[in-house]
Image (cartoon, coloured by chain):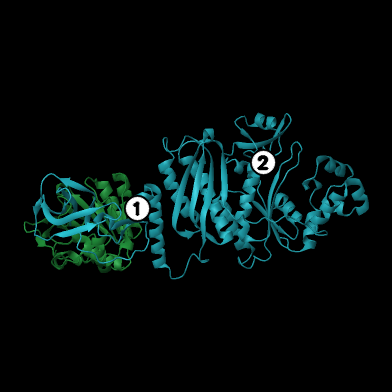
Chain colours: A cyan, B green
Amino acid sequence: MRWLCLHFPRLPAEALGLRDPLDVVTDSRGPQRWLITPGPGDALPAGMALATALSIRAELCPHMRKPGAERAMLKSLAHLLYRYGSPVAAAVEDLDETGRIPRALIWLEIGSSLRLFGGLESLLSQLHADLDELHQHAQWAVAPTRGGAALLAVHAPAQFLDAMPALQSRLSRLPVGTLQWPGSVLDALRGMGLRRLGDLWALPRTGFARRFGAERLLALDRLRGAAPDPFRPIVPPPHFRRRFEFAAEVEGAEGLLFPLRRLAFELQGWLRARQLGVLSLVLESEHADRRRHAIRLRFLSPHRDGTRVFEALRERLNREAVPGVMPGAVRALVLKAEDVAPTAAGQASLFASEEEAQLQWTQTVERLSARLGEAALWTPAVHEDHRPERAVQRGAVQQSIAARAAARRPLWLLPQPQRLPSPPVMRGSDVERIDSGWWDGADVRRDYYRACIAQAEAWVFRDRATGQWYLHGWWS
Amino acid sequence: MSRAAALQAVLRDARLWRGDSAAPLRAEATGHATLDAVLPGGGWPLGALSEILHARPGVGELGLALPLLARLTRAKRHVAFVAPPFIPYAPALANAGVALRYTLVVEPRDTADALWSAEQLLHAQAGAVLLWQSRIDTTALRKLQLAAEGGGGIGLLYRPIAAANESSVAGLRLRVAREEGGASSVEVLKCRGLRPPSRYALAA
């Protein structure tokens, strides 16, 4: 096994959407509060009591951690990273003890995918590019056991240890304090003069188990691969639904863009892992008093391009995140994929200039319909009907239509026939009689003529029921 | 590069106009033979904005662009009508040979959206974008011109006759009117690379 372990030291802050270095996240136990993300500079390490930290930097802005948001974010990251290896496991290792720092970890088994990505370096550079896109900070290590990889990722990152003996000798030099064990156990070990992991492995096994419990012995065995290490693998869910909760209410579109980008790229990761493309999605915003606002987007072709999703949603938000349309400031965003379809695996082909132009057009039309509304864009379509107003249809964009030869018709049609006060001046004597629609209640009995109105050529008709004259189009 | 080559490069620049000869211009035929014969490059300039001035709808202004639309859509190039005054009537377009599935109609709510849409579509390599606007300022005209240059398509801007008094960045300016007999005629008001010739009848 080759486990790539990723440790996310700033996850508690990232889960709250905090980006200012002065924002620190704290955990609390009774009256005690301490930092679980480091403050700016080296003077404020994670684990320091909040009171001490504030006495050093009074302008620090402390936030309480939200463990639920951390777990949700770690899970979505695990789904995102699914394409780099399998199986995938994730855990937030938390100890209910003052001054301890949680560890957010994701493990990927990359033994079988290393060749696919062309080696560790290229895999890591792609993975880091994905994480950078989300502004997510991670430390990594590769080792043959999950526990070993985790210890290295947290305490001695950026190491690739392929063989068990190398891992054992590296781990045996780590201090016992690196183990995520209760403080009382660690104190007892130190009291016995056991400073490093190597010292623990050298102890008699039965004595150690009696003194500290069989579980601790098993944990030590798992670290060096001497005992199996079962886990529950994470698989991407069959549906995509992600929620982003803001630390404070957000007004206007600008503040929504960063998390929106993140959600779009999480969707991209989910689609990639499942080899699907998205056709339609819903972005819901949650407001005060449980009010919600939904933005529904449809794409003309299934795709898994996070940027395309983001751009289309941004256009809509710029239009809709205003008072009167959205019910006030936003508390949370939810992105759901409504309709997905399989896409061709290779999105880039070698001879794709024509396809690319088509894609560019499609994306532009999507952006237009996102900003103007779907009803503002249409494709003319011919419909088999003698009544002129029924012969034109507002086709959904780019639906294919079989055109048929019709009688001679003007290029401009008025949306509604316009009543003329007096009979117009005719041009020529051609008349077209239309008698239709008696079967569906929209009865039409008209004589159509060409007429001259204000130096332009008009398409007019006389209603044979009333004798009234109407303007219905322009020859152009 | 030698001096002569540098000079040649400058002379070949499409933005340069020399009074004594027609500048080489990439263009797409309008489909009206008499008009093509006099236009520089033989038609609508590619990657540029052209203006069509008309007093009111129904004087042949759409018929002027129809052969172009038919040729482009049958070559699977997209064309768009942005903010048309009436409904472009599908049966008539189909009769003229326009492939409807490559035709897009955009009905924006206001001028800003209309200009933005036209610009986006020109950028996205539309074959032609037809835009109807009664008032348009120089900045917007420049933006459209740039978008047309970027996408390499043809921008046709429909404006009222009164716009003839305003200056414009458009390389080609035509005025369409209906004659007494009912036929349409087109007058070249301005064209880049040639002295404006006069008035031509359009085949109905």
Kind of residue sitting beneath label 1 = Leu
- Near mark 1 (Cα within 10 A), the count class, few <14, some 14-19 or many ≥20, is many
Q: Residue at x 64, y 63 (%)?
A: A120
Q: Residues under labels 2 and 1: Cα distance?
A: 45 Å
Q: Residue at x 22, y 65 (%)?
A: B67
In the rendered structure, find residue A377 and report the number of the disc placed on it.
Answer: 1
Residue lying furthest front in this view? Answer: A439
Q: Residue at x 75, y 36 (%)?
A: A98
In the rendered structure, find residue A67 and report the number of the disc placed on it.
Answer: 2
Query: Nearest the camera: A310 or A201?
Result: A310
Residue A306 located left or right of residue B62: right
Residue A66 x, y percent position in the rendering: 64, 39
Quarter holding the N terminus of chain B is bottom left
Helix, strand or loop at label 1? It is strand
Residue A141 x, y percent position in the rendering: 69, 56
Query: Nearest the camera: A58 or A356?
Result: A356
Q: Chain of mark 2?
A: A
Residue B97 x, y percent position in the rendering: 25, 66
Q: Residue at x 63, y 37 (%)?
A: A24
Query: Nearest the camera: B83 or A318?
Result: B83
- Is residue A284 shown above or below B172? above
One can see residue A37 in this view: no
